[in-house]
Image (spheres, rainbow, N blue to C red):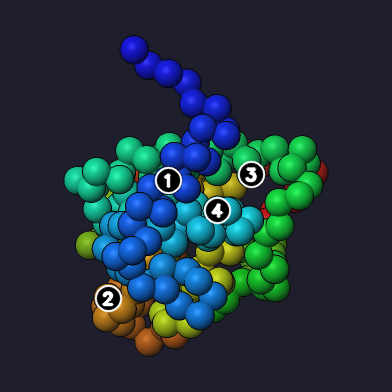
């Protein structure tokens, strides 16, 4: 029998799971779990959710699903993403939620994609330019087919801004995965010092809406 969970029930499940793993986790000075395994990521994302950082929490849960698809926490992470999407769509009714301070302006950005994604890349370029961001365009036949954002150390906030904006422009995604780029950045975008948006063949842009405002 399938039971539809209420918002309160979902929150209770997340809090219970986070508290169960607490004894095994280490925490930073702000009290956030620092583990990089599936449990650590889940606990940190749950903490971010409860502290009102919905975008960061959504990125954490989505990252868990991408990095640990076989984890027993994956189903709960997917449920959390759907709950956060619902929360974000109704923020006007949840005035008590406090979001992270907004990041002003996009970081230096490179768009990377296969020749098949060239049309989508050009449309994304136009959208970013309309927001005073002038991305570097890189066509790579070996680029991944999935849309994701890669960032160098210290650029997480800017990467999340890029991911949230792209997710708002796409039909096929409610979220866009954000993850550290590490050494792969120099491979996919040689000489680029900022955030990299990989434009996959799965990216489908919404048609322009008159009067719509970009993130």
Name the residue nearer the viewer: 104 or 72: 72
Confirm whether residue 48 shows in the render: yes
Q: Nearer the viewer, mark 4 or mark 2?
A: 4
Label 1 to label 3: alpha-carbon separation: 23 Å
Q: Residue furthest left?
A: 70
Q: Which residue is mark 2?
A: 184
Label 1 to label 2: alpha-carbon separation: 37 Å
Question: Which mark sits nearer the N-terminus, 3 or 4?
Answer: 4
In the image, taking residue 39 as reference, residue 45 lies left or right, namely right
Name the residue nearer the viewer: 163 or 113: 163
Residue 174: percent from the left, percent from the top? 50, 42
Which residue is painted at 41% across and 68% down in the image?
A: 33
Label 3 to label 4: alpha-carbon separation: 11 Å
Q: Nearer the viewer, mark 1 or mark 2?
A: 1
SS of the residue under disc 4: helix
Residue 101: percent from the left, percent from the top? 70, 68
Q: Which residue is mark 3?
A: 88
Residue neighbourhood size for the residue with mark 1, other residues' Cα within 10 Å, grouped as few (<14), some (14–19), many (≥20): few
SS of the residue under disc 2: helix
**Quadrant placement of the C terminus:** bottom right
Which residue is painted at 41% across and 53% down in the image?
A: 18
Name the residue nearer the viewer: 60 or 170: 60
For the residues bearing labels 4 and 2, Cβ distance under 8 angstroms: no
In the image, taking residue 93 as reference, residue 87 lies left or right, namely left
Labelled disc at residue 49: 4
SS of the residue under disc 1: helix
Q: Nearer the viewer, mark 4 or mark 1?
A: 1
The quarter holding residue 212 reads top right
Q: Which residue is mark 1?
A: 16
The quarter holding residue 153 reads bottom left
Confirm whether residue 41 shows in the render: no
């Amino acid at each position: 029998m399938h039971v539809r969970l209420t918002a309160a029930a979902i929150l209770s499940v997340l809090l219970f799971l986070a508290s169960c793993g607490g004894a095994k986790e280490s925490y930073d000075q702000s009290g956030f779990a620092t583990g990089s395994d599936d449990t650590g990521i889940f606990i940190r994302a749950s903490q971010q959710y409860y502290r009102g950082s919905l975008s960061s929490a959504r990125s954490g849960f989505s990252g868990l699903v991408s990095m640990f698809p076989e984890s027993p926490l994956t189903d709960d992470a997917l449920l959390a993403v759907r709950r956060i999407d619902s929360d974000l769509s109704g923020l006007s009714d949840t005035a008590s939620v406090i979001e992270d301070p907004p990041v002003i302006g996009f970081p230096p950005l490179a768009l990377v994609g296969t020749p098949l994604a060239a049309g989508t890349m050009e449309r994304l370029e136009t959208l970013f330019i309309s927001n005073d961001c002038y991305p570097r365009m890189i066509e790579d036949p070996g680029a991944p087919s999935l849309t994701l954002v890669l960032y160098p150390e210290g650029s997480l906030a800017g990467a999340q801004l890029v991911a949230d904006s792209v997710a708002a422009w796409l039909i096929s995604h409610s979220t866009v995965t954000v993850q550290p780029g590490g050494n792969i950045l120099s491979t996919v975008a040689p000489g680029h010092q900022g955030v990299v948006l990989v434009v996959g063949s799965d990216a489908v842009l919404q048609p322009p809406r008159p009067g719509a405002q970009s993130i």
